[in-house]
Amino acid sequence: MSCVLIANWKVNLDMKALENYCKEISISLPLLIDKNNDVQIVMAPSYLHLPYVRQQIINQELISLAAQDCSAFRDGPHTGDVSAAMLKEMGCSYVIIGHSERRLSYNENEELLAAKLECAYAEGLRPIYCIGEDFEARLANTFLPKLRQQIKDAGLDRLAKSKAIIAYEPIWSIGTGLTPTSDQITEVSNFIHELLPNQDIVYGGSVNHENAASILSLNHINGLLIGKASTDPEQFMQIIKATLNK
Ligand code: PGA
């Protein structure tokens, strides 16, 4: 894989904003990239908005769909859940699993995340498995063992045999405007690469058009997971442009 840019819209963009977004992107994206660019754009709207976005991008080979989460169960009595099979049916090819916002707000632990990963594997969805340390672990220099644990407990061997993407997202960087130094990101990307040599690694946390290219030039980083800056079509297009010029 050359480069994957994942737009994680979280709980943002109402229908009007979404219509505008899809309109803008379907006009400007084909002017910017084609199949030869080796850039894969992945959009992760809310569950509810998946069918609309799918309909808008259906002719755009350059864009794939992701869900922001999936159920840990394949089917059955789990009110409120959305299964990996349903996501597949809705046109998703990726699913984000283990985002720190879900780990923190819903106490999602690795046992649960391993079950979600299994559901994704079973449906042939490509998981984007998120790991990351909090500021305390960074200060205490315990972040590498923590990251190893997040990978090990979610099923290291299984991940190693899968097509999962590993997203390194330091919690202290998400939505804060703080980004780790190049050396800090490289230390972690090398570390993940040693554990999972065949998996793609992306970075997420306060990515914008000014830092995108330099982060993408770092060792073993072949993509970006973008939150806030991806909710504005102009900013997202600027990030894509920066990526192409790197
Ligand atoms: P951010 O979010 O780009 O707004 O920091 C990234 C993420 O949570 O995936």
Image: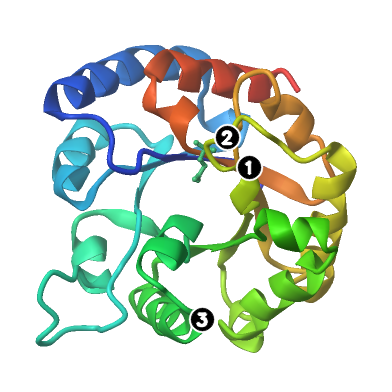
Callout 1: few (<14), some (14-19), or many (20+) C-alpha neighbours within 10 Å?
some
User: Can you identify the residue that label 2 sits on?
Assistant: 176
| CB at disc 1 and ligand 1 closer than 8 Å | yes
Amino acid at the residue labelled 1: Ser
Which circle's residue, 3 or 2, is located before the other in the chain? 3
Residue 76 sits in which quadrant? Answer: bottom left
Q: Is residue 104 above or below residue 121?
A: above
Q: Is residue 106 above or below residue 16?
A: below
Callout 3: few (<14), some (14-19), or many (20+) C-alpha neighbours within 10 Å?
some
| CB at disc 2 and ligand 1 closer than 8 Å | yes
User: Can you identify the residue that label 1 sits on?
Assistant: 173
- Relative placement, left or right, of 10 versus 90 is right
Callout 2: few (<14), some (14-19), or many (20+) C-alpha neighbours within 10 Å?
few
Can I make out residue 90 in this image? yes
Q: How many marks?
A: 3
| Alpha-carbon span between mark 3 and mark 1 | 21 Å
Amino acid at the residue labelled 2: Thr
Q: Judging from the image, what secondary structure is the residue with disc 1 in? A: helix
| Alpha-carbon span between mark 3 and mark 2 | 25 Å
Report the quarter where the C terminus lies.
top right
Residue 243 sits in which quadrant? Answer: top right
How far across and down, in percent of the image, does residue 133 sit?
A: 67, 60
Residue at 73% from the left image edge and 36% from the top image edge: 216
Amino acid at the residue labelled 3: Glu
Residue at 60% from the left image edge and 17% from the top image edge: 241
User: Can you identify the residue that label 3 sits on?
Assistant: 110
Q: Judging from the image, what secondary structure is the residue with disc 2 in? A: loop
